[in-house]
Amino acid sequence: MKHFRSMWEAQPVFKALSAPMRVRIMELLYEEGDWKLDDIARALKLTNSAVSMHVERLVEAGLVTVQTVPGIRGICKICKPCYGGMMVDMCPNLPEQQNFYTDDIPVGAYYECAVTPTCGIATPKQIIGEFDMPKYFMFPNHYDAGVFWIGTGYVLYCLPNRLKPGERLVKLTLSMELSSEYPGYNEDFPSDIYFEVAGVNVGKWISPGDYGSRRGHYTPAWWPENCNQYGLLKTLSITREGTFIDGGFRIGDVTVDELGIDYTTQITFRISVPKDTKNCGGLTVFGRGFGDYDQGIVCTEYYE
């Protein structure tokens, strides 16, 4: 899944797909899998140069990749789609939300945790220690982690507070890629994931499952196929009206004013799965180098 944060950001994709023939090429790739450029030309009754021109536009828009491989009669080019879906934020920021600070926090930058198996942690280059050994969560290289998963427990972050004297927080959003945690993977495995901000329990989101039927778009090639591969991008928003997931689904009544945050406050963020919750299905957090979204925990502070 590719996420565009505005229509302007998605404009190259709109432009590339404005040609019906390029839409047809994308349909072929999704219907039949990876295709040689020669085969696309034959299927669409086009010249190789015409297909190459259309594919070049799709590559420039980030929709496909072209890989050169040895063929029977020399070199052949294989065309592959990059994403299984696309999400575009259509609604611009409201006027009172135009002032903001934003940070992309590495998922391994927690400063405290308490976890139980099944659990594990990995950087984009290697697994840290061994699976199902909680002690590795506090090894120094946990800061480099691109993914971690826990059966129960919590991780605790300290968020940057960039507010200055005279600035009042009116909205706080935290965007992250999450899923449940199952040994291997199980896409029908609900889990209650709780969020706490500045020491206040703001609500929970029920993750539908732990996803692994396909490789995540950014998951490294060395990552085992039978492990969790990607999650769902979720945005926690704490506003003056309450607490929401993905902008419209209310998960709690806590307002941003009730958090008591000013420019002097240390802002903590805790993600947890209690062992006594109804759906105790674990937690996986994906960061840069893993999953479908090349980001950590994106924290945005809107102020007036």
Image (cartoon, rainbow, N blue to C red):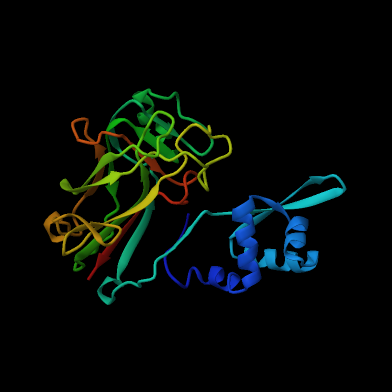
Q: Residue at x 21, y 63 (%)?
A: 169
Q: Nearer the viewer, residue 72 or 239?
A: 72
**Can residue 60 be seen from the camera position used here?**
no
**Can residue 235 be seen from the camera position used here?**
yes
Q: Residue at x 63, y 50 (%)?
A: 33
With respect to residue 111, does 95 lie above or below?
below
- Horizontally, is 41 left or right of 26 in the view? right
Taking the view exactly as shown, the residue that stands out farthest to the bottom is 95
Query: Residue 79, position in %: x, y?
Result: 68, 54
Query: Residue 13, position in %: x, y?
Result: 55, 68
With respect to residue 86, does 195 lie above or below?
above
Query: Residue 220, position in %: x, y?
Result: 55, 40
Which quadrant holds the C terminus? Answer: bottom left
Q: Nearer the viewer, residue 162 or 2?
A: 2
- Horizontally, is 241 left or right of 39 in the view? left
Q: Residue at x 34, y 38 (%)?
A: 180
